[in-house]
Image: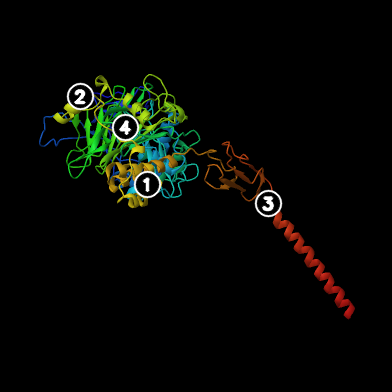
Amino acid sequence: MSPTLAPSPSLPTPRLRTTRDGKWVPFESSAVNTTRGRSENRAGDGRGPGPRAGRQPSPCTRPHRDVHALWSNEHALAWHLGDDFRANSVAWATNKCLAWEKLEDELPNFLGELPDCPCTLAQARADSGRFHTDYGCDIEHGSVCTYHPGAVHCVRSVQASPQYAAGQQCCYTADGTQLLTADSTSGSTPDRGHDWGSPPFRAPPRVPGLSHWLYDVISFYYCCLWAPECSRYMRLRRSSDCRTYRPPRLASAFGDPHFITFDGAKFTFNGRGEYVLLESGLTDLRVQGRAEPRTTPEGMQDRGTGLTAVAVQEGNSDVVEVRLAPRVGGLQVLLNQEVLTFAEQSWMDLKGMFLSMAAGDRTSIMLSSGAGLEVSVQGPFLSVTVLLPEKFLNHTQGLLGTLNDSPTDDFTLRSGKVLPPTASSRELFQFGVDWAVKNASSLFTYDSRLLANNFLYGPKHDPTFQPLFPEDITPSPGQETEADKLCGDNHFCSFDVAATGSLSVGNATRVAHQLHQHRVQSLKPVVSCGWLAPPDNGLKEGSKYLMGSTVYFHCNNGYSLEGAEVSTCQANGNWSYPTPACQPGRSHTVLLSIIFGGLALVVLVALLYVLLQRRKRNT
């Protein structure tokens, strides 16, 4: 027997009813309990999928089993919509659009609780903790962005909004500019129902796919594709600009291993063991890393180490561990100590987080706080990037430092003692040792005798391991020239070549460092002055609203401009001039025409007078 589903208490739905047999019916649609999680839409349209079933065994093969399913009579199959549509499709769609608009005006405004979009395409692609690629408009896969012409890439907010389970969408042009619906119907449109759903997933507007289809997608067909009423849709799905967007802070660990803290301090720590990369009491976030020596092709172990596993948990969320897959290469992901397989899906909705796997060698973990981790394979080791929203300011500790915009206290011990930025490599080694994981708080899985013996029963930091220090090593004479050519002034690369004797390891470190630098550059804050409206009875030229951008204003014929004709976005986030007014009266064009026409008439009269005078003289 299917359970009766009540509407979400945070979102009243005037046209919601329950049928006698216990089915929930919004609009003209029906749904019963669906599977928890997101419906994948890799071939999506950029606005979201249509209604789709959850995992539903065939009733023919299991006729007596109560299954999870959902269905809907709301669809975009025009030929199947009935006689009214076929008789006058525009009138039919217009009525549907007007009915949707009326319902929307009765529902609470969800736009205020959505996060602002990133200001640039580079920020949107780099902020992977809070935004994820919209599969219907993906620059990496050559999507045509059918419903956002002019865009090359869109992203969606990973988390649904807290009260109304709404979702944000942000689209960008090839030059990185955000597309806004206030300027074009190609702009990004926020969603009353998040495309990927929201816990508990069983009631509107939280059902994955279907809620988004009912509230946001079929209405786009009604208003924009089948009837000339798109302005009604865009009024209620207005793009967010980026005035309040703040990019996340970034820290990384890679290579042999090298650390770059959130505030930009850099150091190398060659310990063997398990260490706290990050702890935050703000959300009880814990990120831990395991460092082990590389085994050379000859079966020997290097004196340098690198990250081979990373584990994360936030509050009472699931525990996810990402580690180098034994023997086969690539990544192995464990969920609560069980190995996951990504054979059928690359995205998973987990407790307190989302997980995305790309190509077997890169995984992204998006936490409910907006924090994000990216773990990838770079050479023989893992490369780890952690992104934290601004709210984590002054709430972090561990090897990745104290996030407070000051690198001077990034080397803070558990006791609170701070090592100076000028600390020696040996002092920094002791800083790393101090952040060894405690057995009681370890997030790692010890599912082999080797792991248990080395890390569970033994000390979390191996005191017998002899580390390498930068001042003690130099590349072998035969590699020095090649190392200089490969690494240039990249000291991390040079260290790893000297420590491992491998140019390929050094190159992997160089690439990881460059990726970190590129992302730091992408996430630099920019100043936005926000959208600037065109004047009534006029128009504007320009749809860029970042510092230095200029917008031009013009009035329609019969109106004259009162105010500045040009406005520029200033460094303080304000426009140099507000939108001018277009007042009724003769426009500049008409006035100029009268002036030049009058001058031409005067010249013509003067010429006639001269000709007449000459004729009189000749006579």
- Alpha carbon distance from label 2 to label 4: 44 Å
> Can the viewer see residue 63?
yes
Residue 185 lies, with reference to residue 371, above or below; the image says below
Mark 3 vs 1, N-terminal side = 1
- Alpha carbon distance from label 4 to label 3: 53 Å
Image location of residue 85, percent across then percent down: 34, 45
Mark 2 vs 3, N-terminal side = 2
Which kind of residue does numbered mark 4 sit on? Gly
In-front residue for pair 31/554: 554
Residue at numbered disc 3: 588
Examine the image and state in which quarter residue 391 appears.
top left
> Can the viewer see residue 95?
no
Residue at numbered disc 2: 458
Mark 1 vs 4, N-terminal side = 1
State the residue at coordinates (63%, 42%): 580
Q: Nearer the viewer, mark 1 or mark 4?
A: 4
Image location of residue 284, percent across then percent down: 34, 22
- Disc sitting over residue 89 in the figure: 1
Mark 2 vs 4, N-terminal side = 4
- Alpha carbon distance from label 1 to label 2: 74 Å
- Alpha carbon distance from label 1 to label 4: 31 Å
Picture colour scheme: rainbow
Residue at numbered disc 4: 197
Mark 1 vs 2, N-terminal side = 1
- Alpha carbon distance from label 2 to label 3: 85 Å
Which kind of residue does numbered mark 1 sit on? Ser
Residues at discs 1 and 4 in contact (Cβ within 8 Å): no
Examine the image and state in which quarter residue 501 appears.
top left
Residue 456 lies, with reference to residue 46, above or below; the image says above
